[in-house]
Amino acid sequence: MTLARQSPMLVIATLFSHWGKHKLQLATLVIGLASATALWTAVQALNDHARASYDRSAATIAAFDQPAFARPDRRLFDDSAFAAFRRAGFMVTPIIEGRLGPPAGGLTITGFEPLTFAPAGETPISVPRGENMLSFFDAPGELLADPTIVARLQKLLDQLPESERPVVRRQENLGGGQVLGDISTVQRLLGKTGLISKLMVTEPGSQPNAAIPFQWQDKLVLAEPPVSVDLAGLTDSFHLNLTAFGMLCFLVGLFIVYSAIGLAIEDLIAALRTLRICGVSLRSLLGSLILEMTVLALFAGTLGILGGYLVAAQLLPDVSASLRGLYGAQIGGSLSLEASWWLGGIAVSLLGALGASLGAFLKVSRMALFDARGASAWRAQQTRTLKLQATVALICFATSSLLFLFGSGLSAAFIVMAGLLLGSAFLLPVILSALVLSGSKTARGPLSDWFWADSKQQLSGLSLALMALLLALGTNIGVSGMVEGFRLTFNEFLEERLSADLYVLATTNEQTQELMDWAKAEPAVTATLPIWGASASIDGHPVSVTGFSDHTSYRDTWQLLQASPSPWSETLEGDGVLINEQLHYRLSLSPGHSIVVQSETGPLELQVAGVYSDYGNPRSEIRLPNPRVAAAWPSSERRRVAFMTNDAADLQKRIETELAIPADQMIEQKGLKQFSQAVFERTFVISGALSTLTLAVAGVAMVTSLLTLASARISGVAPLWAMGVRRRAITRLEGLKILMLAALTSVTAIPLGVAITWCLVDVINVAAFGWRLPLFVFPSQWLTMGLLGLGTAFVASLYPLMKLLRTPASDLAKVFAHEH
Amino acid sequence: MNIKAIFMLALMTAFSTGVNAQGFAGLGTTADGFKQVVRGKEIEFPLDYGAHPGFRIEWWYVTANLVSDEGAAIGLQWTLFRQASSPKPDDGNWSTSEFWMGHSAVTSANNHFYAEKLARGGSGQAGARTDTIDVWVDDWAFTETSPDRLALKAAGDRFSYTLKLHPTGDEVRHGENGYSVKSAQGQASYYFSHPFLEVSGSVTIDDKVHTVTGNAWLDREWSSQPLADNQEGWDWFSIKFDDGNRLMAFSLRDTNGDRYVSGSWISEDGSISPLAGDKIDLAPRAQSSVAGRSIPTSWRISIPSRKVELNIDALNPQSWMSTSIPYWEGPVTVSGSHKAMGYLEMTGY
C-alpha cells in the first residue's frame, strides 16, 4: 500500500530509469520527434515568412498605387506641375519611378516627397521626421531599401562618386524589393532632374471642383491605379504545395516516434506489470506515462524548432528565388524565430508524441497482469491486422477516386494524393504478405522454410518502417518524374515559343517606332515582330493582354491545346482571341465561348478561338493582334520588339551603337532560354529538397523499427542457433530478409510513384499553376530509387545486424531457460 | 508679440542640422550664419510685410473675431511660418534650405476645426514675395489685392473661408520701435502688428455658408533666435476693446517657473505704449480639461495704471490644435472693466 501511495514518483523514476539504460531508444525517440517537428516547423516558417513579406509588399505598393495625374503616354513631365496643382487645390504628391542600373539586374526605385506624401491607409513607409529629415532630403540624400536588395543597391551606388552616393537605410518592413528616396535624390540618381512620373492623389474624393491648371489641361489625365495582382492569392498554391510536403515529412517522422515508443513499451511491459501487481493504479501508471511523454515531447520539440529554423534558413534562398522567378514576389532575406513558431512547434511535437503513443497507452491499459498469451497468438493477430489494413487501404483509395471524379480545387487535389499515399501504405503489408506467402511455396528444405515463415512473422513488426520507406520512395519517384517531365516539356515549349533571334526592350514607345523604322531598312532583319502589352479584366478577373504580329512563325510553330477550325484567321481578321491555358482553367473558357474584356476604350466582345500553353506564367493572359491592342488600349506599352535575323549578336551591337539602346535592354534567344530554364528549375527545388529529406527520415524510421525488433529477434533465431546454424549464417539470413522486404517495397513504390507523378501533373499542377503537363515515365529513375531504397535498408540494418552477430551465446541459451 | 508663432517652429527645429535644439521647440537654438536682430533697425512698409531671407524664422499670423449673419461669434486663424535650415538662399529643385508650415482654424462656441499644411522650399508649393504681402501654401493664400485691400483664404476638411481685409488704421511696432525683447537674456525679434483690420467675407462650416463681418489682427515677426534656451511655453493675448483701443500681452514661462511678461497698449489713434512686466498682471482663473491636459482657459488681466481689470474666458475651451506640435488657440470673450473681444494662445501645456 505504501508503494501505491508513493506510486507517482516511483513510477516516474522507474520510467526514466528505463531511458537511462536504453540510451539508443531514447535517442531515436527524440530524433524522430525532433525531425518531425523540425520539418513541420521549417515549412511553416517559410510560409509565414513569405506571407508576411507579401503583406508588407502589398502595403508598400498600395501606398503608391493611388489614382494619379500622369501623361497618357506615361512619359515623365515637368515637376512644376506639382506646385500648379497644389495651388489650384489638388491634394497631390509628386512621384518619380524609374530603374536604377541595367534593366536586367537593376532595381526599381521610387522617389516621393515626404511632406505631402500621405498614402491612404496604413503604410510600412516610415517617412523620416525630426533631425533625420534633413539628411534624407539633402544631397547626397538617403535611400530606404528592403533588406533583401540592400547589397544589390549598394553595388549599383558604388559606381557613383562618393560625394554623390546616398546613404542606404534598411527598412525591415518595406518588403517587395523596394527602394525609396526623396524625390530630389531619385531625380538625381536617375538623371531626371526636374521631372516626375505622376502626381498621386493623396486624398481621393476631396478634389476641388476647379478644372486642372490651364497649362496642364491637355497634357495630364487622371488615371486609376492598375489592377493590382494579389500576391498572396497568386502564391497560395505554392505554399499549399510546401505545406503538403511538410505534412508528409511530419507523418514519416511520426512513424519513427511510433516505433520507438512501441519498442520502449515492449521493453517496459514487464516492469509495468510488476508495478501494477505492487498496487500502482492503472490511472497513475497511464498518468505517469503521459507525463513522461510530455517531458520528452517538450525537449524534442525545442530541438525540432531549432532544427526547423536551420532547415528553413537553408531553404529560404531557394524559396525566395522560386517565388521571385515565378510570381515576381520578393521576400525578405532573414528569418526570425517567432513566438508563434515556438508555440506551434511545441504543440505539434506534443500532439505528435501523444498521438503516436496512443497505441502504446492502449496496450498498457489492456495489459493482463499475468501474461497468458501463447507464443503463436501473433498469427491470429496478424491476420486480423492485415484485414483491417486492407479495409483502410480500400477506404483511402475510394475517397481518392471520389474526389478525383467529383472534387475540384487544390485542396481536393492534395486529398487525392494523400489518399493514394496512405492507401498504398496500408496496402503494403497485405501485398508483402501475399508475396512472402507465394515465396514460401518455393521453399526447399527447413532453413528456407524457416526463412519465409519468419519473414512473414517479422512483417507486422517491420511494416511501419516499410510503409515509411514506401512513402518516401513513392514520393521521390513521383516528384522526380514530374520535374524531369516538366523539363522535357518546357524545353520543347521554349523552342516553339522563342522563335525570334533577338528581343529588344525600347526605353519609350517613341523609341520603339524609331527602332522599327530603322529595322525596315535593315537587310539583316528578316522579320520584325512587335509585342504590345496592356492590362485588362474579364468579369473582374485580371488578365494581361499581349499583342502579336501576323507572321508565319506564330501560325506554324504555336501548337494550340484546343482550337476552333481556323483560330489564326479568326483572331487576325475577325473577333477571335487566343487565351492561355491558365485562363482556360480559371474561367472555364474554351474555343467558341464569348468573353467581354474591359479595355481602356470600353467593353470588347471577343470569341475564344484557341487555347495555348503558357508554362510558368502565373497570370491569365489573352493574345490579340497588335493593331487591335493599340486601338482598344491607347496607353498600351509598346516597347517590346522581337527580330528574326541570321546574326543576332551583330544586330544587337548595331542597335546599341546606332539607336543608343543599352545592351542590357536586349537579349538573344539563347540567353532568354537559359534565363527561363533557370527560373523553372528553381520551381521544383523545394519539392526535390523535401522529398530527399523524407527519404532520410524514412531511413531513420527503418533503423528504429529494426532496433525494436532486435531484442525480439533473439528468441526468434535462438532455436536456429540451437539446431547448429552459425551466428554468421543467421545474421546473413536476417540481412537477406530485410533486403528482400525492402526490395519488394521498392518494387511496390514504382506504381505508386507513377501514380503520384500522374497526380502531380494532371491534378495538382492544373489546380496549382493552371497548366497540365504530359505524363512521362522514367524507368532509369525507378532503378535509381530502387537501389536507394535497398541502400537505405542496408545502412539501416547494419547496426541491428552487428548487434545480432555479437549476441553472446549465453543470451541465446537463456531463451530456453524459461521454457516449460 | 506674436510669440505663438515661435512655438510652431518646433517642427522646424527638427530641420536644424547638427545642433541640439534648445528651449521650447528649439527656438532658443543659436543661429550661426543667420542675420541677427539688432536695435535701431527701421521697419519699413510695405517692404517688411514680405519675406526676410537670411533670417532663420518668420511668420505671417492673422486672427479674427467675427460675427455671422445669424449673430454667432466665430473665431478664425490663418498662419504661415517660414523656417530656414541654412542661411543659403532657396535655389529651387526641391531645395530644403526652407520649410513652410501653414495652420488655419475656424472656431465657434461649439465647434473647432483646424488644418495644417507642410511644404518645402524650392518646389513652389509655398512661398512669399519679399516686398509685400503675397504668401501662400497650396491654395491657402494671404495677398494684397490692391493698396488697401487684402484677401485671405484657407480650407480644411470641414471648413473653408474667403475674406477681404480692409485696414482702418496703421501698423504698430512693438517693443523699441519694432525691436521686441523676448527674455531677460536679451533674445529678441522684429515684431509689428496691424491690429486695425476690418473683415468681411464668408465662412463655410460643414457645407453651410455664413456671411461674416468683424475685426482681424495681423502679426509679422522675424528673427534668428527669438527665445532663451530655457523658455518652455507662453500665454499670448490680443484684445480689441469696443472703444477702439487694443492690448497685446504675453507671458513666457521658463523651466525655473519664472515668467517674462511684456505687452503693448495701443490707443485708438494707433499710438503705442510698451507695458513692462511690472505694469501688467496675467493670472489664470480656471482650468479646463483639454485633450488630456489641464489648460487655463479663463484668465484675469490687470493693468492698474490704466484701471483695466479683465476677465478672459475662452469662447470654446476645446480650441485645441492637434497639429504637428499641439497647442491651444481660440477666440475669447472679455468682461470686467471694459467690453472687448480677443484671441488667446497657450503653448507648452
Image: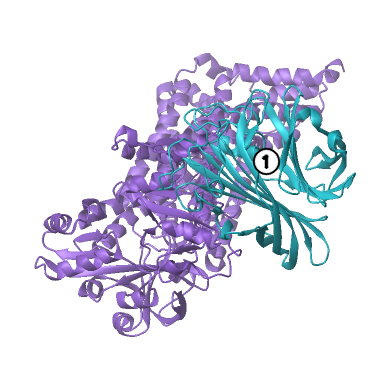
Chain colours: A purple, B cyan
Whole-percent x, y for residue B29 in the image: 57, 28
Question: Is residue A344 visible to us here?
Answer: no
Label 1 resides on the chain identified as B
Number of dots carrying numbers: 1
Residue A213 appears left or right of B200: left
Q: Nearer the viewer, residue A437 or A59?
A: A59
Q: Amino acid at mark 1?
A: Asn
Residue under numbered circle 1 = B2
**In x, y percent, where is residue B322?**
70, 45
Quadrant hosting residue B309: top right
Q: Where's the N terminus of chain B, which quadrant?
A: top right
Q: Is residue A1 left or right of residue A650?
A: right
Q: Residue furthest right?
A: B336
Rendered-image quadrant of the C terminus of chain B? top right
Q: Is residue A489 above or below residue A793?
A: below
Viewer can see residue A45? yes
Tell me: A624 left or right of B258: left
Is residue A607 shown left or right of residue A63? left
